[in-house]
Structure formats: structure tokens, C-alpha cells
Image (cartoon, grey):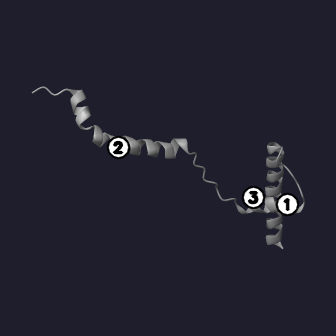
Amino acid sequence: MVVSFSSIFVVNKMEWKPVITTILIVCCLFFGIPIKIKRQPNKTEVLFQSYIHKFNKSYSNDEEMYQNRYQVFKVSYVISNNLIELS
């Protein structure tokens, strides 16, 4: 008895359809639909955002300026906390 690959595939065609469908759905979930998990901001980031809002600052057009101001804010925050702890 000679059995060819094409005849096996035709016989098992109905069994492969759900498998292929499942693989395609999973691929779409991971590659077709972008998944982005937003990280939680730390305390200094929340305070910096509060500062920006309170004093009506805007760094949305300049990412480099935002990072520079944020770094200065973090240093100032640490220094002020250290001074408070010393008193």
C-alpha cells in the first residue's frame, strides 16, 4: 500500500484548520495588535508633573529640556529631603 503525503494532508485537512486558525489568532495578538504596558511613575515623577502643572510649565515640544529640568528637579528634591532630615 502506497500512501502519499498529499493524500495524508487531504485526510487530515479538517484537523489542521483549527490549529492554523489558533496560530494565526495568537500571532495577531502578539504581533498585529501592539501591546504597551505603561509603567507606574515614581514619586519624583509625580511631583515633577505636579510642579509643571502648578507653575504652568510646558516641555512637551522639547524632550531634552524636559529631561534636563527633571534631572535638576530630582537633585533638588534629594537635597531638600536631606536638609529636612538633618533639621
- Name the residue that disc number 1 marks: 53
User: Farthest left residue?
Assistant: 1
Q: CA distance from mark 1 to mark 3?
A: 12 Å
Q: Is residue 51 above or below residue 30?
A: below
Q: CA distance from mark 1 to mark 2?
A: 52 Å
Is 64 on the left-hand or right-hand side of 38?
A: right
Q: Is residue 78 visible?
A: no
Is 11 on the left-hand or right-hand side of 21?
A: left
Q: Earlier in the sequence, mark 1 or mark 2?
A: 2
Query: Which corner quadrant holds the N terminus?
Result: top left
Of helix, strand and loop, which one carries label 2?
helix
Q: CA distance from mark 2 to mark 3?
A: 46 Å
Q: Is residue 9 above or below residue 74?
A: above
Q: Residue at x 83, y 44 (%)?
A: 61
- Name the residue that disc number 3 marks: 45
Q: How many marks?
A: 3
Q: Are marks 1 and 2 in contact (CB under 8 Å)?
A: no
- The percent position of residue 71, horizontal first and vertical second, equals 79, 51
Query: Which corner quadrant holds the C terminus?
Result: bottom right
Amino acid on which the number 3 mark rests in the picture: Glu
- Name the residue that disc number 2 marks: 19
Q: Earlier in the sequence, mark 1 or mark 3?
A: 3
- For marks 1 and 2, give the one nearer the viewer: 2
Q: Give neighbour class at mark 2: few <14, some 14-19, many 20+ (Cα, 10 Å).
A: few
Is 65 on the left-hand or right-hand side of 45?
A: right
- The percent position of residue 9, horizontal first and vertical second, equals 26, 33
- The percent position of residue 49, horizontal first and vertical second, equals 80, 59
